[in-house]
């Protein structure tokens, strides 16, 4: 198959949309692709109308369509291949009601109907035509009609009392066939339902080969779909309850579709492994003719390589009184085939050996190939690297793959109480078209959920993707964006404030000097009252000057948040800077806590001493102010320095104060964020910017009611 060939688009109508049909049709597409020599992409349509729209628009190469759609599009198609079921190209619909509430055509008035879909042949259209042909207008007859999407849902609606009648397709209009169809869809509850009529027959649904296919591709598809005996598709079609496909122009009863490769041997052997009775498909197996071979032994009838394992299996079953099974591969007719053999002992009187064995041998080559593919695809949940869950509609945990158990060790313990399960159910209840997938935080990890309900199977499937790194990146980008905005603000504020601050401080300085001079002159003239007035003015001017200086510092800090300020770096003794900072908080500290120091030798660090001191002072003040003077006897401020194995300088400041909640922790480095009244909330933001500019890190750990640990790491020399 050329990888450059454009894929054939194969659209399937939605009644083949249950979970098991999804898997089956995927296999069907893969095998058909191999037989036809072209890549095929199989899609399940959301609605019957979608199939019709895509066919009409010429956007599909092949479509498994309803009987009506096959009829409508046959004139402009290359070919229509009708599905053959139970040897027939036709089928009927059975009208179904509850066995304990039987209805007739005469008593339909006022009942409720549950149909599959407006374009479903067996699930609606056949029933509608049947009733209209008898003069019954559905809109007048039924008190309520609704479409529920599948045969199973329609039957369940009748079983649960939500509807009184429905319609089910059937290959033969007889009770036995209908019972089999009911049991397939509602299991043991089938006896609660009964038929009250059958519709006229219609040509089967089938595969439309459109004009988008080339003549050669269409011919290849016809050959692959009608020549099933050579192509090996028949074992898979059996899963769809389809014998095969036939061109709609063929007679009503298509040619026999018996697969030549479906070989089997059924035999009864005596104690000497002689054939008492035997039956073989087409009278031959393993390339041997089995006619008239009764009375001969396995070794006489079969080639040695086939007879030896069968003889051993039969003897083991007879001697030990238990059934056995074996698989083996043989070369027959130049082809390697896989066989499965089963042997069961014949019943015997107590204490007596079995008089013989029953032997069944089947060719399972095609089946094994399908199962291998099935197991490979079925291993997806096990090998999928991310968590996957299946829940009941009520939130009961049905299944979790190994990745889910690894990511959420408490999943089985919490069950429906696990936050992942709760979030999945909540999202399904409020799901809106186009809404974003929910994100759940579990143990500090962020998980994005993809949730969808598989109504036919009665389960909710949940895929969880770890998006923690993405969330962290988004947070960093958001922080960077805020910092950029803050930088722009700082630049504007600084520009607007610096000029007025400059002349304000200059004027204040000039006014203070002049008042001092005039005050001194007045003192000489002994005018004490005027001197006191000058003292008050001088004090006010001094406070104004201090305030203006404070504004200057704020502007500098704003600039520092967004870019490294001009600094005068030198080799700095970290411990000496810490000692100087401790002296500045000594007065507050002695009323609130006991100081513990653990200064281990550390190398010098290249930094701006004043800025580094500002960091230490901010951190120490936060630690001191976090501890109440009422607990002074218990409180401890621990300050330590040490060198890491890599030579980094590590400074730790730990307090026993009130601690911080996770919500506060998440925002402590945001400018202007503070939990203390009358505080600017700039200290840690500025400190973080300074340490980062030195190539270091500033981290916090905190627990409410226990305290906070600040760790500052600086690069080595």
Image: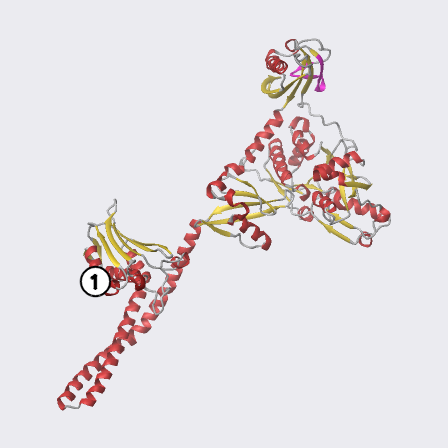
Which residue is rendered at x = 59% and y = 55% of the image?
Answer: 430
Residue 144 against residue 261 in the figure, above or below: below
Q: Secondary structure at mark 1?
A: helix
Residue 103 in the magenta stretch? The answer is no
Q: Position of residue 477 (x, y in %)?
A: 40, 56
Image quadrant assignment for residue 264: top right
Of residue 271 and residue 494, the one placed in the foreground of this image is: 271
Judge whether residue 78 can be spotted in this image: no
Which residue is rendered at x = 56% and y = 53% of the image?
Answer: 426
Which residue is rendered at x = 24% and y = 57% of the image?
Answer: 595
Q: Position of residue 157 (x, y in %)?
A: 72, 47
Q: Give the magenta range.
A: 276-289
Q: Residue furthest left?
A: 524
Left or right: where does residue 539 sit relative to residue 304? Answer: left
Q: Position of residue 706 (x, y in %)?
A: 35, 55
Of residue 146 and residue 665, the one placed in the foreground of this image is: 665
Q: Quadrant of the N terminus?
A: top right
């Amino acid at each position: 198959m050329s990888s450059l060939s454009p894929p054939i688009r194969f659209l399937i109508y939605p009644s083949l949309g249950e979970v098991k049909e999804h898997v089956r049709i995927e296999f069907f597409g893969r095998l058909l692709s191999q037989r036809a020599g072209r890549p095929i992409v199989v899609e399940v349509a959301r609605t019957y109308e979608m199939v019709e729209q895509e066919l009409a628009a010429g956007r599909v190469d092949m479509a498994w369509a309803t009987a009506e759609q096959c009829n409508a599009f046959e004139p402009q198609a290359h070919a229509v291949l009708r599905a053959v079921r139970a040897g027939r190209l036709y089928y009927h619909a059975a009208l179904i009601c509850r066995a304990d509430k039987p209805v007739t055509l005469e008593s339909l008035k006022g009942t409720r109907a549950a149909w599959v879909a407006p374009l479903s042949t067996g699930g609606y259209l056949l029933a509608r035509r049947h009733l209209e042909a008898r003069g019954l207008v559905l809109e007048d007859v039924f008190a309520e009609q609704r479409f529920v999407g599948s045969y199973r849902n329609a039957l369940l609606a009748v079983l649960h009392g939500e509807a009184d009648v429905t319609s089910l397709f059937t290959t033969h209009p007889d009770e036995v066939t209908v019972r089999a169809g009911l049991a397939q869809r509602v299991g043991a509850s089938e006896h609660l339902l009964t038929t009250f009529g059958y519709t006229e027959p219609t040509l089967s649904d089938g595969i439309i080969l459109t004009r988008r296919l080339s003549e050669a591709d269409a011919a290849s598809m016809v050959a692959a779909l009608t020549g099933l005996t050579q192509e090996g598709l028949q074992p898979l079609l059996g899963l769809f309850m389809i014998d095969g496909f036939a061109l709609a122009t063929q007679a009503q009863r298509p040619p026999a579709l018996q697969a030549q490769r479906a070989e089997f041997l059924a035999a009864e052997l005596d104690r000497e492994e002689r054939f008492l009775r035997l039956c073989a498909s087409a009278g031959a197996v393993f390339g041997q003719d089995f006619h008239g071979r009764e009375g001969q032994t396995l070794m006489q009838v079969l080639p040695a390589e086939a007879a030896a394992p069968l003889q051993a299996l039969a003897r083991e079953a007879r001697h030990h009184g238990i059934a056995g099974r074996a698989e083996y591969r043989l070369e027959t007719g130049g082809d390697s085939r896989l066989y499965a053999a089963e042997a069961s002992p014949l019943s015997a009187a107590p204490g007596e050996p079995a008089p013989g064995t029953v032997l069944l041998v089947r060719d399972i080559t095609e089946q094994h190939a399908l199962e291998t593919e099935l197991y490979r695809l079925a291993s997806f949940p096990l090998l999928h690297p991310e968590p996957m869950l299946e829940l009941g509609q009520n939130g009961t945990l049905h299944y979790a793959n190994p990745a889910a158990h690894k990511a959420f060790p408490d999943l089985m313990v919490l069950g429906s109480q696990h936050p992942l399960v709760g979030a999945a159910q909540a999202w399904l209840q409020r799901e809106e078209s186009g809404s974003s997938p929910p994100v759940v935080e579990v143990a500090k990890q962020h998980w994005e959920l993809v949730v969808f309900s598989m109504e036919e199977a009665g389960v909710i499937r949940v895929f969880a993707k770890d998006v923690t790194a993405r969330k962290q990146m988004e947070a960093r980008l958001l922080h960077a964006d805020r910092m950029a905005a803050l930088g722009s603000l700082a630049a504007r504020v600084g520009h607007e404030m610096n000029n007025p601050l400059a002349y304000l401080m200059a004027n204040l300085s000039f006014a203070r000097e002049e008042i001092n001079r005039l005050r001194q002159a007045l003192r000489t003239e002994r005018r004490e009252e005027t001197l006191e007035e000058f003292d008050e003015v001088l004090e006010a001017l001094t406070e104004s000057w201090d305030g203006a200086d404070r504004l200057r510092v704020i502007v500098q800090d704003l600039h520092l948040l967004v870019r490294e300020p001009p600094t005068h770096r030198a080799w700095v003794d970290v411990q000496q800077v810490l000692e100087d900072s401790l002296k500045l908080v000594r007065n507050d500290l002695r009323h609130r806590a006991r100081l513990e120091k653990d200064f281990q030798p550390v190398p010098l660090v290249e930094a701006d001493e004043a800025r580094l001191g500002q960091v230490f002072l901010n951190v120490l003040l936060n630690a001191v102010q976090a501890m109440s003077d009422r607990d002074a006897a218990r409180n401890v401020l621990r300050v330590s320095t040490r060198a890491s194995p890599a030579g980094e300088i590590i400074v730790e400041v730990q307090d026993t104060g009130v601690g911080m909640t996770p919500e506060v922790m998440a925002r402590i480095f945001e400018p202007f964020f503070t939990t203390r009244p009358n505080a600017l909330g700039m200290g840690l933001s500025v400190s973080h910017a300074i340490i980062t500019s030195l190539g270091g890190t500033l981290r916090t750990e905190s627990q409410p009611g226990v305290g906070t640990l600040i760790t500052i790491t600086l690069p080595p020399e």
